[in-house]
Amino acid sequence: MLKKAKLYKRAMDLILASLFVLVFSPVYIITMLIIFLQDRGSPFYSQERVGLNNTHFMFYKFRSMVINADEILFNDPKLYKQARSGEHKIKDDPRITKFGKFIRKYSIYEFPQMFNVLKGDMSFVGPRALRPDEYKMYASKSKNNARNLRHLTSVKPGITGHWQVNGRSNVDFDNRIKMDCYYADHTSLLFDIKIIIKTPIAVIKGDGAY
C-alpha cells in the first residue's frame, strides 16, 4: 500500500510540474530576461540542500540577489550573523535586487524548482529543503533535534508544504521544523491536495515572503 501511495505521489509530481512549466513558460522566459538584463549575470542560482534520507542535491532558483551576494555576506559580520542564525530570513536583506523582492514576494524565484521535481530530487509538496549548515546546526543542539531531522528527511522536500501555507518566513525555525515533522507524520495524497489548494492563496497574499 505504501509503495502504491509513493507511485501515485510521483505520478502527481510529474503531471503537476510538467503542466506548471508548460503553462508558465512565458513567466520563465520574461524572468530570465529581466534578471540577465539588470546586471548581465546568470538568471539562475543553485545551492546545495539536504534531501530524502539526508542525501544532498543542487537546488535551483531564479537569482534574486546581486551577483556578489556571497562576498557582501562574508564581509558584513552583522549580516552574516543574521543569515546564519537559523531563526528567520533577513527581512531587509540589502543584497536583494528590486526585481528580486518582487519575485520573492510572489514566489516566482522558486519556479526553477519544478526541474528538481521532474528530476526526482523534490516533490511538489513536502518539507522545506534545508541547507547542510542549517541541518548540522539544528541537529547539534540536542538528540531530539537530530531525531526530528531524520524524521523530516524520511520524505522528499517540497516546493510547497505545511509550513509554506501557514506563515512562511513569519514562522521561526523551531516551529517550522515541528510543522514539517507533522507533515512527515501525516503525509497523504489528501493532505497534499489540501496544501496545493491553499498555496495560490498564500502566494497571492504574500504574507511572510521576503
Image (cartoon, rainbow, N blue to C red):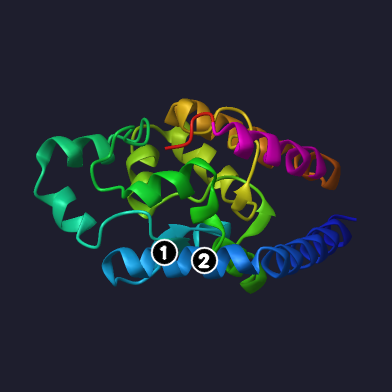
Report the residue marked by disc 1: 34
* Residue ID at (83%, 47%): 189
Location of residue 32 in the rendering, given as x and y in whole percent from the top left corner: 46, 68
Q: What stretch is highlighted in magenta?
A: 193-206
Q: Say which quarter of the image contains residue 52.
A: bottom right
- In space, the residues marked 2 and 1 are separated at their CA atoms by 6 Å
Locate residue 55 relative to residue 19 in the image: left or right.
Answer: left
Q: Residue 30 carries which label?
A: 2
Locate residue 200 relative to residue 5 in the image: left or right.
Answer: left
Please tell me whether residue 204 belongs to the stretch shown in magenta.
yes
Asked whether disc 2 touches disc 1, contact meaning CB atoms under 8 Å apart, the reply is yes
* Residue ID at (61%, 28%): 166
Q: What amino acid type is highlighted by mark number 1?
A: Ile
Task: From this view, report whether residue 110 is shown above or below residue 78.
Answer: below
* Residue ID at (80%, 58%): 9
Q: How crowded is mark 2: few (under 14 residues within 10 Å), some or many (20 or more)?
A: few
Q: Say which quarter of the image contains residue 201.
A: top right
* Residue ID at (64%, 69%): 25
Location of residue 3 in the rendering, given as x and y in whole percent from the top left corner: 84, 61
Please tell me whether residue 171 belongs to the stretch shown in magenta.
no
**Magenta segment, prevailing SS (helix, strand or loop):** helix
Q: Locate the N terminus by quadrant.
A: bottom right
